[in-house]
């Protein structure tokens, strides 16, 4: 039986932390359930899931639909799109028998690439390596969610590019249902031409991007900072959102993160002046509302302003340096995480 390989390549960068990743987990689960109810899909579809943050990982190798077990996705810093393309290329080479003039092989793989941010690595050489393969290794459909998409990258990589402005749970659910119907239709009419255009008509709220795509914003709409809780010494991640009426970043959310939460894979984003930051989110571990940046090691940490003021200093939970409050009001440059 010729298989129809389907690769789902998901950006699990920090911007996915919290609800977004839970929603994607739930939407993928539903998509697989829908595919399993379709006899054509059951016969032909093989699925693989690849995620990328500062690294790319095969979280599930190409597996027959009936045996596919869905892994829980976890968010981490970084958006190494180029690394993901290289991994995709080597997985296809390993797992798929491409059709040539002499061999029938498998159907040409379908790749769904989901991202909500801008790549933090140089993806162009990886794309060139993928493109240089003969026969054409895959049909790639890219879906950008949110308002920080680098459509220049996506339209260059993908055969067709789609845009979902709001990554709401409803829209994500629709998106995965749409992907599953595209896969079902491809499995029924499997041909090496890939999907016919009609199969690609997206649902409301998701539009196809042509040559006039929205530009990537020239400054980040969201910032992420890593911090350590002074009370529990555990790590957390703060999300800030740019608020146009103020012209500043305001607190959006904070999340507990695992102790092995990775660093940004060498990518250092531009610094931001503390003048641009209207406030930091509350610590998710101990509810401290105040935040400081260590003058010695640069670590961000939560602290309790009232008791620190009584003492006259606060202590960095990472390096132990003690800081007074004398220069607390000067502005300084802050280095966010890769996002
Ligand atoms: Zn805390
Ligand atoms: Zn320190």
Image (cartoon, helix red, strand yellow):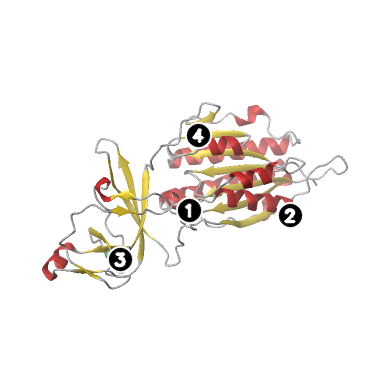
Image marks 3 and 4: residues in contact by CB distance under 8 Å? no
- Name the residue beneath numbered marker 3: 229
Q: Quadrant of residue 142?
A: top right
| Image position of 285 with respect to 156: above or below | below
Where is residue 294, by image quadrant? bottom left
Element class at badge 2 = helix
Along the polypeptide, which appears first: circle 1 or circle 2? 1
Compared across the picture, whether 337 is left or right of 74 comes to left
Can you tell which of label 1 and label 2 is closer to the viewer? 1
Question: Which residue is labeled 1 in the image?
Answer: 78
Say which of marks 3 and 1 sits in front: 1
Ligand 1 found in image quarter: bottom left
Q: Secondary structure at mark 4?
A: strand
- Report, in whole angstroms, how far the alpha carbon at label 1 lies from the one at label 2: 26 Å
Q: Residue at x 15, y 61 (%)?
A: 326
Callout 4 touching callout 2 (CB < 8 Å):
no
Q: Is residue 91 above or below residue 159?
A: below
Nearer to the camera, 126 or 237:
126
Residue 163's disc number: 4
Query: Residue at the location (42% across, 67% down)?
Result: 259
């Amino acid at each position: 039986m010729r298989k129809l390989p389907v690769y789902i390549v998901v950006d699990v960068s920090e911007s996915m932390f919290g609800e977004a990743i839970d929603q994607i987990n739930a939407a993928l689960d539903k998509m697989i359930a829908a595919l399993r109810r379709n006899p054509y899909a059951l016969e032909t579809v093989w699925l693989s899931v690849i995620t990328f943050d500062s690294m790319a990982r095969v979280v599930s190798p190409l597996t027959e639909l009936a045996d596919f077990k869905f892994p829980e996705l976890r968010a981490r810093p970084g958006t190494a799109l180029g690394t993901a393309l290289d991994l995709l290329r080597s997985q296809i080479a390993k797992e798929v028998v491409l059709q040539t003039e002499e061999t029938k092989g498998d159907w040409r793989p379908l790749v769904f690439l989901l991202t909500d941010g801008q790549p933090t690595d140089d993806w162009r050489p990886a794309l060139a390596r993928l493109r240089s393969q003969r026969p054409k290794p895959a049909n790639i459909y890219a879906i950008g969610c949110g308002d920080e998409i680098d459509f220049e990258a996506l339209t260059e990589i993908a055969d067709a590019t789609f845009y979902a402005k709001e990554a709401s749970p409803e829209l994500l659910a629709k998106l995965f249902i749409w992907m599953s119907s595209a896969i079902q239709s491809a499995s029924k009419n499997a041909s090496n031409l890939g999907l016919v255009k009609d199969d690609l008509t997206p649902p409301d709220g998701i539009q196809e991007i042509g040559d006039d795509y929205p530009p990537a914003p020239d400054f980040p709409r969201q910032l992420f900072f890593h911090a350590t809780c002074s009370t529990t010494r555990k790590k957390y991640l703060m999300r800030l959102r740019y608020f146009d009426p103020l012209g500043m970043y305001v607190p959006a959310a904070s999340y507990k993160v695992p102790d092995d939460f990775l660093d940004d894979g060498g990518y250092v984003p531009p610094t931001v002046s503390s003048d641009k930051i209207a406030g930091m989110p509350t610590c998710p571990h101990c509810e401290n509302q105040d935040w400081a940046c260590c003058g010695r090691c640069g670590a961000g940490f939560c602290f309790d302003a009232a008791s620190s003021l009584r003492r006259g200093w606060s202590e960095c939970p990472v390096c132990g340096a003690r800081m007074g409050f004398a220069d607390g009001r000067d502005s300084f440059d802050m280095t966010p995480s890769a996002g």
